Amino acid sequence: MGCYDCCMRCLGGVPYCSLVATLLCFSGIALFCGCGHQALTETERLIETYFARNLQDYITLAYIIQYFQYVIYGLASFFFLYCIVLLAEGFYTTSAAKQTFGEFRSTMCGRCLSSSFIVMTYVLAVLWLLVFAFSALPVYFFYNMDATCHTIDVLTETPASINQLCVDARQYGLLPWNAVPGKACGMTLSTVCKTREYRMTYDLYIAAFAGAGITLLALVSDYASAGANLAALPQWGTIALHGSCDLVTLKV
């Protein structure tokens, strides 16, 4: 076998859809976990500096942020391993497994593995949809804050109206109702919006939200392609070994 034939044989066994979904999953998880972790740290700093004067007012928020950061560590590790397993399953089912295990056992093994990963991917996609929706909440908070700051900049000639424009962190559940001051108004709020910490935190939450969306797209893509290939498997007469979009049919 020549070099060209060997390369074409290797390329023919690559599960391209599984590979693309894996790369998307890696990118989305890296973006979500990395930016989300730093955004939570910057959020705690903003609350401590501009919205709360007493440590007891934001100590609960600090513990919650620390808890979510540990969750992020676990998510990054889990999805890294899960994507590696999915990619390995794709390479396995599109390789010459027939020569190793025999025809009947290859078929049963392929169906069992495919069904298991389809169910797991479906459950993860549903759960990650909730994460995707949850990651939109801080983006919504900072968007409202940014819109209020823009209104303050427009109404600079009417100080009385400016002082009535506020962002209250207590309304979003970030601080207890007895927190002091708990809110930022007028030019103080406009100053907060112009700080580097605020702009960076806002951008980090947007990036984390985008990363959650990319991860959800990767999970849905892998689930849809695997489900379509499993549905195309014949019951008798042929052996269909699949890896995401790639479908290799071996005649019995």
Image (tube, helix red, strand yellow):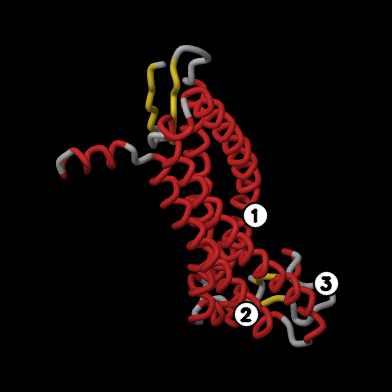
| Direction from residue 12 to residue 219 in the image, left or right | right
Figure check: 50 above or below 170: below
Q: Work out how far the residue at label 1 is from the one at label 3, CA to CA, in angstroms.
A: 23 Å
**In front: 150, or 202?**
202
Q: Residues within 10 Å of mark 3 (few under 14, many from 20)?
A: some
- Can you name the residue that lies furthest to the right here? 178
Q: Earlier in the sequence, mark 1 or mark 3?
A: 1
Which callout, 1 or 3, points to the residue nearer the camera? Answer: 1
Residue occupied by mark 3 = 177
Quadrant where the C terminus lies?
top left
Figure check: 218 above or below 26: above
* Residue at 52%, 68% in the rendered image: 34
Q: Residues within 10 Å of mark 2 (few under 14, many from 20)?
A: some
Residue occupied by mark 1 = 134
Residue occupied by mark 2 = 46
Residue 64 visible in rendering: yes
Q: Work out how far the residue at label 2 is from the one at label 3, CA to CA, in angstroms.
A: 18 Å
Q: Amino acid at mark 1?
A: Phe
Q: Work out how far the residue at label 2 is from the one at label 1, CA to CA, in angstroms.
A: 20 Å
* Residue at 74%, 87% in the rendered image: 53
